[in-house]
Image: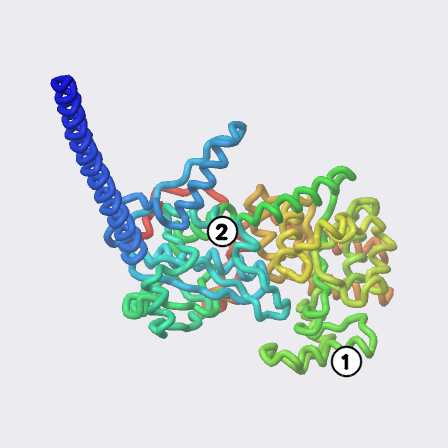
Amino acid sequence: MGLNTAAFAGDRLEKLRNSGMVSRSRMKLWMIRATTSILLWTCLVQLTALSETWGPRVLKGWPSCFSQESAASAAIALDVHSSPELPARVLPPKRVYKNNGYLMVSCNGGLNQMRAAICDMVAIARYLNVTLVVPELDKTSFWNDPSEFQDIFDVDHFITSLRDEVRILKELPPRVKRRVELGMIYTMPPVSWSDISYYHNQILPLIQKYKVVHLNRTDARLANNDQPMELQRLRCRVNFSALKFTPQIEELGRKVIKILRQNGSFIVLHLRYEMDMLAFSGCTQGCNTEEVEELTRMRYAYPWWKEKIIDSDMKRKEGLCPLTPEETALTLRALDIDPSIQIYIAAGEIYGGERRLSSLTSFYPNLVRKETLLEPSDLRFFQNHSSQMAALDYLVSLESDIFVPTYDGNMAKVVEGHRRYLGYKKTILLDRRMLVDLIDKYNSGSLTWDEFSAAVKDVHALRMGNPSKRLVIPDRPKEEDYFYANPWECLQPLNEDERLPLDSI
């Protein structure tokens, strides 16, 4: 009995010893794992901070797993894998370059003025080897639209689709952001119609000195002509590929186009006859006394509209006024536009309302606009957001059988160029100076209807968006053809002698 008890006690002691050894082994293993995890996590945090701070300077050969861009790419990839019917999206490789600093830009103007400016700023950032921050959109213009870039454009697509050309961030890295908050930034408006050498010689040294430069005006800041071919083609790539509207805007645009297509062919009439256009231009043809006074008061209310005293009749005869609805109706009839065709008006509220539209609707009763084609619920998120509404009109304009702008503003020019890019889709470019002269002669009885119609057709025979080389007027860039209205460099094959890399310029 005693021996059995002693033996039992010995076995128990041995088990306790073994148990203690196992516990100590497990404790050591746990400590090793915990220490390793802490070290790995510390390294991860340090690498993240390092990549944000120094970017491509230090980690230029490494794929970043921690940026907002990569997170967006991962989300896109996840969506693709979860939807087997969609082809896998292959992102372009990141471009490796020494980052010279950061470029911030604040766009000014309406949607299409800002669109062209964004294309220019991407090309400038690419040429200067700097990091571009997603552009800030104008919120202080006449339209007072609070929309951010991501409210109108697909920001993740914008960033990832251009990653082989330029690094684009949604916001500055923390270290650089603190410098800006402390006032360590240089802000300026670049000189209008400058070629790329201006940015290399004047802007790049400022970026290298201050690390961050803010360009606070971006409209027409890059010259139309005599730029490197690759730079011109990059402007087109941004405009026609990288700047996609948000899925919500794209979906609603497709819905409007589907409704129109169900009823046959359609024309988009960019009837630029809104209150702001008339007040700004001083064009009051057909307005009554009260309306003229209202438009004049509005022009004086905006101090940055520099021209105040305007002779409306003289300006109209010079072809500098948008066509009135009455003049537009006569022009479309003279061009033998079918009276039964659908005409989609791509514009804001027409000044004078139904009274001014009556002559147009009497000849073309199938006059529609997004507000009449869609339910109020479809547009509730777009109300009071003029740029988002303009984006919807832009999409419909691209798909129309014919596009007819009554004034050569920014939307007319950018849509014209985009339709050229899509295969020279028919765009009637109205010669307003000739038209108002012919209309006045017809209204006075100097021309019969047949003579008037024949003259209008003859004037516009070669103004249908046909292929043509862009007009160049040395020393008068404002008068030459606008790059985004006719980006001919992007509409022809690239010769071997034109394949000059931007880095070697």
x%, y% of residue 47? 27, 50
x%, y% of residue 51? 29, 52
The answer to whether one can see residue 296 in this image is yes
Q: Which residue is mark 2?
A: 155
Residue 283 lies, with reference to residue 32, above or below; the image says: below
Q: CA distance from mark 1 to mark 2?
A: 43 Å
Pointer 1 or 2: first along the chain: 2
x%, y% of residue 145? 61, 64
Split into 4 quadrants, where in the image is the N terminus? top left
x%, y% of residue 295? 73, 76
What residue is rendered at 46% in x and 66% in y? 193
> Relative to 39, is 309 on the left or the right?
right
> Relative to 126, is 264 on the left or the right?
right
In this rendering, the count of numbered labels is 2
Q: Of the residues tagged 1 and 2, which is closer to the observer?
A: 2
Q: Which residue is mark 1?
A: 293
Front residue of 431/73: it is 73
